[in-house]
Each structure stands twice: as C-alpha cells, then as structure tokens.
Amino acid sequence: MVSNPAPVPALAATHRLAALASLSDAELAALDMSARHLTRFAAYREIIGEGRAELAPSIIIDGWACRVRHFSDGRRQILGFLLPGELIGVRHHRDPLATTAIVALTQVALCPAPPATESEQGGLAEAYAVSAALEQFYLFRQIARLGRLSAYERLLDWLLETRERLALSGLTTADSFRLPVTQEGLADALGLTSVHVNRTIQLMRREELVELKGGVVRLIDPPRLAKLVDYRSGEVTAAPSA
Amino acid sequence: MVSNPAPVPALAATHRLAALASLSDAELAALDMSARHLTRFAAYREIIGEGRAELAPSIIIDGWACRVRHFSDGRRQILGFLLPGELIGVRHHRDPLATTAIVALTQVALCPAPPATESEQGGLAEAYAVSAALEQFYLFRQIARLGRLSAYERLLDWLLETRERLALSGLTTADSFRLPVTQEGLADALGLTSVHVNRTIQLMRREELVELKGGVVRLIDPPRLAKLVDYRSGEVTAAPSA
DNA sequence: CGCGTTCTTGACTGCTTTCAAAGATGGTGG
DNA sequence: CCACCATCTTTGAAAGCAGTCAAGAACGCG
C-alpha cells in the first residue's frame, strides 16, 4: 500500500497559487490566515445548487468536488472536477447565479479566497486570473475529450490532466496520486458507463500503462501515455513575462 | 486579413451587449465608432492560432467562427461556436496565450471591443462580464451535451441553444435563423460523423420537429423541443439586481 | 453549363451500453 | 477479532447506437 501524499491543510492551496504567480509575504500570510476559517462539507453533499446565488470566492483546502449537471431522467454528467488548491465561486459580474451545481465527492474543506488588491505588487490577483484561465482550459479539454476520444483515450487523457493538476498543488509523488473517485464517478465525468470504465481500466492494466488500486493511481510512463492521446500540457497559458 | 473602413451596422453586437446590461449613450457611441475599424477574415481562415499570443479583445460584428481543437491524427473537435455580437480575445491575465485556435466558419468581421472603464455608471463592463459568464455557461452545456446526450438529443439541444444565442443578438425571425454551417461542421461540434448528423436531421424532419434547408433552420415548437432534451435557458445567469 | 462541395442513402462493422449477477472491499458493531 | 452489510468492482452475454466505407444525387458557384 502506497502512503498518501499527505494533504496538509492550506499547503495545497498555497503551493498552487504560488506556482501560478509569485506571491508577497503579506499574501502568503493572508492565505494562511484565511485557511483557518474552514467550511466543511461531507462527501456527496451539495456545496452550491444550480441557480442559487453564487458562492463567495473560495479555495478548496482539501478534498475533491465536482461541477455536475443532473438531467430530469436521472442521467448525470460531471462537467469537471475541482481539486485541492483550486478556486470556486469566482464571479464574472455582480449578483451572479451558479450556472452549475457543485457537489463534494469526498469530505471537502473550503476557505474564503483572500481578496486580491489589484494595485499592489503582489501577484495574488494574477494567480487568481491564471487560475481562471486554467479552468477554462480544462473545460476546453473536457469538451475535446468527450467529443472526439474513445473510452480508452478519454481515460488516459483524463488521468494525465488530473496528474498535472494535482502536481500543481503538490499532491503527486513520483507518478502516483490519490484518486478518491469511484469508477461510476469517472464514468459520469467521461461520458461512459461504469461497466465500460472498468473494462477500460483493466485493459490498461494488462497493457501496463497504469496501476490503479486502493484509490491510488500510478501512471507507468507519462510521456509515452501523452503521445498516445496527443496530450498537451496546460503549463503554457501565459507568455513569459520577461 | 484586410482592414476595411467601410461602415457596417454594428447591429448584432449592439443589440447583444445592450441586452446584457444597460449601456450609456457614450458607450453606444463608442461601439458604433469601434465598428468602423473592421478586420475581415475569409471563411475557413484561422483568426488566432493555438498557443499564439491572445487576440486583442474583439467583438464579432458579422459571421460565424468557432474554437477548434485539432488532433495529430486528423480528428478535430469544435469546442464551441462564436456568433455575431459575441466577444473573443477576452483575457484573464497579462500576456495570455490562446488556449485554442479560432477559425472563421464564414466570412467574419471583427472590431475592437471598446475598453470598459469600470468606474463609470455605464454598463459596458458589466455587459462584458455577463458575456464571459454566458460563454462559460455555454461550455458547461457543451460538455453535458457531448457527455450524456444521444445524437438526436445533441442536435436538438444545440439548435435550441443556437437559437437562443442568435436571438440575443437579434438575429432570429420567429423561430427560424440562418445556419451557415455544413453538416460536417455540426458533426465536428457535436462529436458525431457527418453521415450520422444527416440521418438525425432527416429523422427530425420526418417527425416535423425541424425544418432545415438552404442554410435556414426553423424549429417547429421550441417549448416542446426544449422538453425533449431538458433544455434550460441561459437567460438566468444574473440575479435580479433590483 | 460544368465542376466541386455538400447532402443522401445503403450495407456492414464495432464500440459502448444494457442487464444481470457474482466477487471484492472496507467499515461497523457485536 | 470476526461476522455482516453496503458499496464498489468485475465478469458475461446480448442488443443498439453510431461509425465506416462507398457511391450516387443535389446544390451552388463561376
């Protein structure tokens, strides 16, 4: 059994935001301060309902959540995952309504996102902005995944993306990471059935592309996997400022 | 790309932005002014390449474009359409790179988006913000469409969304609108093949849900169609400010 | 009027779903 | 410490939706 990449509170969020832009000491302190005011949600609890007034800007300190769309006939589609260190409740305009529900997939801890004062020299506002750009990037990738990839490719592509996102928050060790999502959860995200997700995983195991057991994934040779699905890193969303 | 000072009515753009927030006379004038500086792109020309420095914020004055992802093996996925009156090149942070290519589907005319000064009483900044929120909403819907709807449902759902979006820009008459996209284009957007799009359209014709000929669509009974796919309007992204 | 693009149609293949049920797995209480 | 239960994973067989390949018809443009 592989030991967990221990998610120490606030660490993931600080790790991620500091990776997106250089933060001042004051901003780092503000993050630490904010992380003391945690709001917790039990697994499977709804964090925000579709059509409700949007959540206050928040940072996921720990746990996995997802945006989800429920259809009237019971089908559901996970639109995207929300991982530790990522932001939710980012508002575009005044008095927004949540366009999608957000549901906790595990126990989730949220803290308020410290307000970023544009005028300062600190990079928190920039970090938030890059985070928003990344979120959009992930949406584009999810669309391409669902539209044009086979089940096999979708799963690989998603694993690579998730690894990259968790790495941003410092939650990967070597090529493995915790994956606290059931195969049914994966199915709802990848537009498949849980049965077929299971078959696909087993195929990938037999081909020694992936190890997956006890909620921990290990990708055997990420660069090779990336080639299989034409995977492109999201690291390059900003031009070098220098 | 050819700059052309020819005065083209900024009707669609003004219609849309004014619908998203109330604009001051100065802002309306700025829009008219801006619409005199058109940049034109021929059909199928690339407006911005993936990974290039992001386009300046612009408004689509006329024509259809799309965000597209090309795979190395030739597959392609249209991530979303960009319709007259909608914005492109909206930036989250400094020095962004375009995360997706944008390609003209018809001849396209672009104009610079007039800068919105936050401090004023005019609502242009708000209109831009709501526009961004809507764009995100459309991405979520595209994900749900590709992930959980059948070919039949995808097409219906997409037609309803497109009608709603074009209506925002004042480009629908009764229940019909221009659809300058080939069935192969639809296939690339809906994650299908053109053959199957064709068969689906014909099925819908036989069932008298839709008329489609000569690049013009007419939806027979939108409310009924909406029920068939659990379609939800995007009108309600903002809480009533009153 | 002619040619290229787009639309249509048919036959066949195959990926993914559906339905059903049998194994694991992990947490809980006795 | 183990039995027990709910949840999750795994497996099999059959059906179906959408893809592929191919070719003919219709359309629109020059």
Image: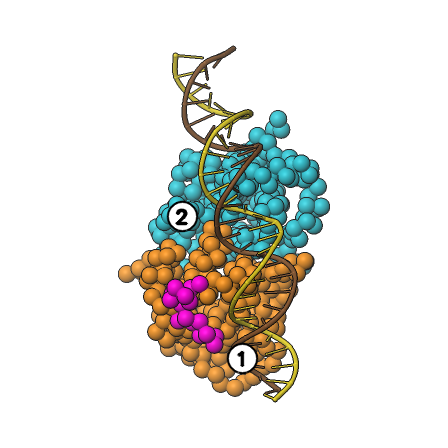
Chain colours: A cyan, B orange, C yellow, D brown
Left or right: where B134 falls relative to A157: left
User: Spatial distance from mark 2 to mark 1, Cα to Cα?
Assistant: 42 Å
Tag of residue A70: 2
x then y, percent, for residue B126: 41, 65
Quadrant in the rendering for residue C10:
bottom right
Going 59% across and 31% down the picture, which residue do you hit?
Answer: A213
Residue closer to the observer: C7 or B190? C7
A20 in relation to A220, above or below: below
Quadrant in the rendering for residue C12:
bottom right
Residues under numbered marks 2 and 1 in contact, where contact means CB atoms less than 8 Å apart: no
Can residue B141 be seen in this snapshot? yes
Quadrant in the rendering for residue B164:
bottom left
Mark 1 secondary-structure assignment: strand
Residue closer to the observer: B74 or D10? D10
x then y, percent, for residue B140: 46, 55
Can residue A122 be seen in this snapshot? no
Instruction: Give amino acid for label 2.
Output: His
Mark 2 secondary-structure assignment: strand
Q: Which residues are magenta?
A: B203-218
- Mark 2 nearby-residue class (10 Å; few <14, some 14–19, many ≥20): some
Q: Chain of mark 1?
A: B
Q: Is residue B210 magenta?
A: yes
Q: Which residue is mark 1?
A: B38
Instruction: Give amino acid for label 1.
Output: Leu
**Which image quadrant: the C terminus of chain A?**
bottom right
Q: Chain of mark 2?
A: A
Q: Is residue A212 magenta?
A: no
Going 56% across and 38% down the picture, which residue do you hit?
Answer: A198
Going 64% across and 58% down the picture, which residue do you hit?
Answer: B71
